Image (cartoon, rainbow, N blue to C red):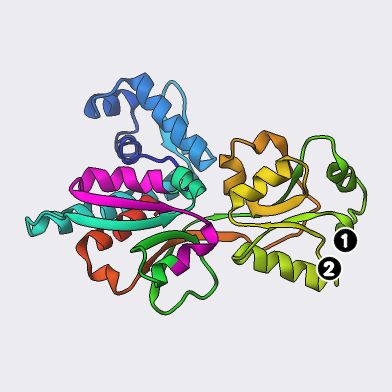
Amino acid sequence: MMHNMQQEDLEYFLDLYQTLNFGRSSTRCNISASALSRRIKRLEQQVGTELYQRDNRRVVPTAAGRQFERYARETLARWADICERVNESGARIDGEIRIYASVTACYSILPRILRRFRELFPDVHIHLKTGDAALALQTVLDDEVDLAVAALPRRSPAKLQTRVLTTTPLVSIGPSMRCAVRDLLQRRPIPWRHVPVILSERGLARQRVDAWYRERAIEAPVYAQVAGNEAIIAMVSLGCGVGVVPQLVVDQSPLRHELQVITEGPALEPYHVGIAVSRRRLQNRSVEAFWETAGVSYA
């Protein structure tokens, strides 16, 4: 639901839901009333709607607030369940896990999971391998890693167990600088058979772009084929052509201000970004612990 929600924020929200009084909750939570108000406002910004109606005399949950209360309780209950299951045997979880992720996933997806995981399992050593997002699932199948952050296909290989963490649109991007490519993109309709395109060498995005061109009986004017969304963005920003990448990658890119999203571009199925793990490796306690932590982090 949200990218930066903290466990502590959920606890503050639930205490206020119980007391309906900022002064009383701030005392119980050992935080100032103004700080508590800021934390609630931050939650509302993340959710995108008001959770409480409040004035100088009362605090009342909105309809969205009542719905969010169930989400907050379920999320904290799942986290407590993980802690209990880990600690009930008294056995320490250590060892190592191997994770594969693209550079963008390291910035946008993994931090939220790793913060919680390190809190609970400080003795597990993490090996992180980065590379082309299109290769993520294959690295798990080849037993190069235990888990991978990946764009998940409609049907995953039987040897893998997958869990969707977030969904991001696939967007068409072009250069914002003045160049021949931008001139072509300003025409209506856009002459797609003449607009050079930067394509991924492989992966879901490549499959969906190829299908879009086939449906329109257009031979894609390929300028280059590259490995990785970051390479597509770099070449597009230089005016070499257009490309298709997940919105998540654009948002995280240092070159995002040198790009434009083409609203008249292909309407493609969004990416379901998630985590994939070898079913066999889930028998390992440290791998299972990471898998469960990822689920709680993106509940």
**Could you classify mark 2 by the number of other residues whose Cα lies within 10 Å: few (under 14), some (14-19), or many (20 or more)?**
few
- Say which quarter of the image contains residue 33: top left
Could you say whether the residue bearing mark 2 is in a helix, strand or loop?
A: loop
Q: Is residue 223 left or right of residue 16?
A: right
Identified at 28% across, 57% down, the residue is 97
Could you say whether the residue bearing mark 1 is in a helix, strand or loop?
A: helix
Which label number is shown at residue 219?
A: 2
| Mark found first going from the N terminus, 1 or 2 | 1
- Say which quarter of the image contains residue 147: bottom left
User: Percent position (x, y) of residue 6?
Assistant: 36, 39
Q: Is residue 273 left or right of residue 213?
A: left
Pointer 1 with pointer 2, Cβ within 8 A: yes
The amino acid marked with disc number 1 is Arg
Identified at 65% across, 38% down, the residue is 256
Q: Is residue 99 left or right of residue 152?
A: left
Q: Against 62, is 58 above or below?
A: above
Whether 212 is among the magenta residues is no
Q: Which residues are magenta?
A: 110-138
User: Percent position (x, y) of residue 141?
Assistant: 41, 72
Find disc 1 in the rendering and name its residue.
193
> Relative to the observer, which residue lies in front, 49 or 100?
100
Identified at 36% across, 26% down, the residue is 36
Where the C terminus falls, by quadrant? bottom left
Identified at 46% across, 67% down, the residue is 137
**Could you classify mark 1 by the number of other residues whose Cα lies within 10 Å: few (under 14), some (14-19), or many (20 or more)?**
some
* Residue 247 visible in rendering: no
The amino acid marked with disc number 2 is Glu
* Residue 144 visible in rendering: yes
Q: Against 27, is 117 above or below?
A: below
